[in-house]
Image (cartoon, rainbow, N blue to C red):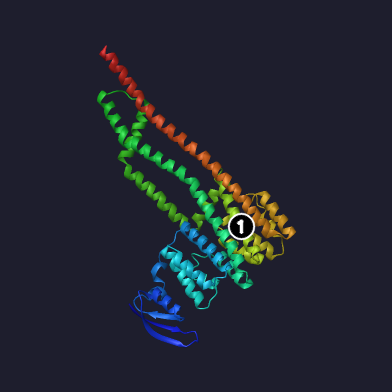
């Protein structure tokens, strides 16, 4: 493919020519190796460079994004700490990644850095991938000349986020699998097993116990109105998703989850850990406390914690201690509040925040394991009771029929 390009040579002289290449990306790489700085490529494949149409429209899921971001940050830290230039480090990661959408993001960031902008400015073009906390930490590292140290802290922060997500998902896989198996077993019994027994009972014109009659009625309803049940489930799922997209619905669900007797402590633990870790990393990186509180508030995934951080921001603005705003036992464990107050008095707030975040993560692991160990037997017991009731309701009339048949034979 013939592509026209405009570039500057090392002396700053403008160069315009054409080049044979597979696409705009390949042409740009070849021209860079020749020492040319490309400003424009026109042709069929130029849309990738100029508009970002290829790859940028592919959405990266939350789990995949955290994984990509963790690898990206850690490798960037390793490469820059060993003396690799920023553009070369980005080029290396661009070649290594197998995720096409993420590769495109790195490519566009590299283009922007090559144009002379800072890394934090280049990352700002993709706010859906690099949140304000990430970008401001990079900016702080660039301003202080301590980017390597900041990248190390960022890599740890992102890795912790990924670990939390993986821990929760991993812990819920088995209970969800049990629920699916339970639903499959019950569906099979009501749809395929019960109709056969019903025909058998009807053929003998036997009187059925009340329990069996109820079970048969439930089976008839499920078979006769399966479409209504399907519509109801669909309506609940769609309605739930629609409600979650609205701010009011999301806030109500968050409040409900945090107040639940069994799940509430776990939700509070994960939210607290995330908030204090982000705040600790920001303060440790030299970002002013007021700005750090504002950024942490933006990053908070729960509106009540965002409100709490807003109160802390207001308190600091008026010269009050930040720890006072964290004295809310409905959201923050008293031990964490005391640690924050001690850290504030000793001038070691950042260290104390990160230390308590590590402690809270350990507690969260214990809570998740405990919750999983409780849920699994509960699901099995409930399934066993339902299957047992159905089995008793079916086999009791069978025993009666057997007795009647034996008596008739004598």
Nearest the viewer among 164 and 28 is: 28
Asked if residue 262 can be seen in this view, the reply is no
Asked where in the image residue 133 lies, by quadrant, the reply is bottom right
Give coordinates of residue 369: x percent, y percent.
Answer: 54, 43
Give coordinates of residue 275: x percent, y percent.
Answer: 60, 57
Q: Is residue 107 left or right of residue 403?
A: right
Nearest the viewer among 359 and 380 is: 359
Q: Is residue 263 positioned above or below 57 on the image?
A: above
Q: Is residue 285 left or right of residue 228?
A: right
Nearest the viewer among 178 and 195 is: 178
Q: Which SS class for mark 1?
A: helix
Nearest the viewer among 407 and 117 is: 117
Residue identifier under label 1: 277
Give coordinates of residue 98: x percent, y percent.
Answer: 42, 62
Tag count in the figure? 1
Q: Residue at x 26, y 14 (%)?
A: 408
Q: Dot 1, how many residues are within 10 Å of its Cα: few (below 14), some (14-19), or many (20+)?
A: many
Q: Quadrant of the N terminus?
A: bottom left
Q: Residue at x 47, y 56 (%)?
A: 63
Q: Is residue 353 left or right of residue 234?
A: right
Q: Quadrant of the C terminus?
A: top left
């Amino acid at each position: 493919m013939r592509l026209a390009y405009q570039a500057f040579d090392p002396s700053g002289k403008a160069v315009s020519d054409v080049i044979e290449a597979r696409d705009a990306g390949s042409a740009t790489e070849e021209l860079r190796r020749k020492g040319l700085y490309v400003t424009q490529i026109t042709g069929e494949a130029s849309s990738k460079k100029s508009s970002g149409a290829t790859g940028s429209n592919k959405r990266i899921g939350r789990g995949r994004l955290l994984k990509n971001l963790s690898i990206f940050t850690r490798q960037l830290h390793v490469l820059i700490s060993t003396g690799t230039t920023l553009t070369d480090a980005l080029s290396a990661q661009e070649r290594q990644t197998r995720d096409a959408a993420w590769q495109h993001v790195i490519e566009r960031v590299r283009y922007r850095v090559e144009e002379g902008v800072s890394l934090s400015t280049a990352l700002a073009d993709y706010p859906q991938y690099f949140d304000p906390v990430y970008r401001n930490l990079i900016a702080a590292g660039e301003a202080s000349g301590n980017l390597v140290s900041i990248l190390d802290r960022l890599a740890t922060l992102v890795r912790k986020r990924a670990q939390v997500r993986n821990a929760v998902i991993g812990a819920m896989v088995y209970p969800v699998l049990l629920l699916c198996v339970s639903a499959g077993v019950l569906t099979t019994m009501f749809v395929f097993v019960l109709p056969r027994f019903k025909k058998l009972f009807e053929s003998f014109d036997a009187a059925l116990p009340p329990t069996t009659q109820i079970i048969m009625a439930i089976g008839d309803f499920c078979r006769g109105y399966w479409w209504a049940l399907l519509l109801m489930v669909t309506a609940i799922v769609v309605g739930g998703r629609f409600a979650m997209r609205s701010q009011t619905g999301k806030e109500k669900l968050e409040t409900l989850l945090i107040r639940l007797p069994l799940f509430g402590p776990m939700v509070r633990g994960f939210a607290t850990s995330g908030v204090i870790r982000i705040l600790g990393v920001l303060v440790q990186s030299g970002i002013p406390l007021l700005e750090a509180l504002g950024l942490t508030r933006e990053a908070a995934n729960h509106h009540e914690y965002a409100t709490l951080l807003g109160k802390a921001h207001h308190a600091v603005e008026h010269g009050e201690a930040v720890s006072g705003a964290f004295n809310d036992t409905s959201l923050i464990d008293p031990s964490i509040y005391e640690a924050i107050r001690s850290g504030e008095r000793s001038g070691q707030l950042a260290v104390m925040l990160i230390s308590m975040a590590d402690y809270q993560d350990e507690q969260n692991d214990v809570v998740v394991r405990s919750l999983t160990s409780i849920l699994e037997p509960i699901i099995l017991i409930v399934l066993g009771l339902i299957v047992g009731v159905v089995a008793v309701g079916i086999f009791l009339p069978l025993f009666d029929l057997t007795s009647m048949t034996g008596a008739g034979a004598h």
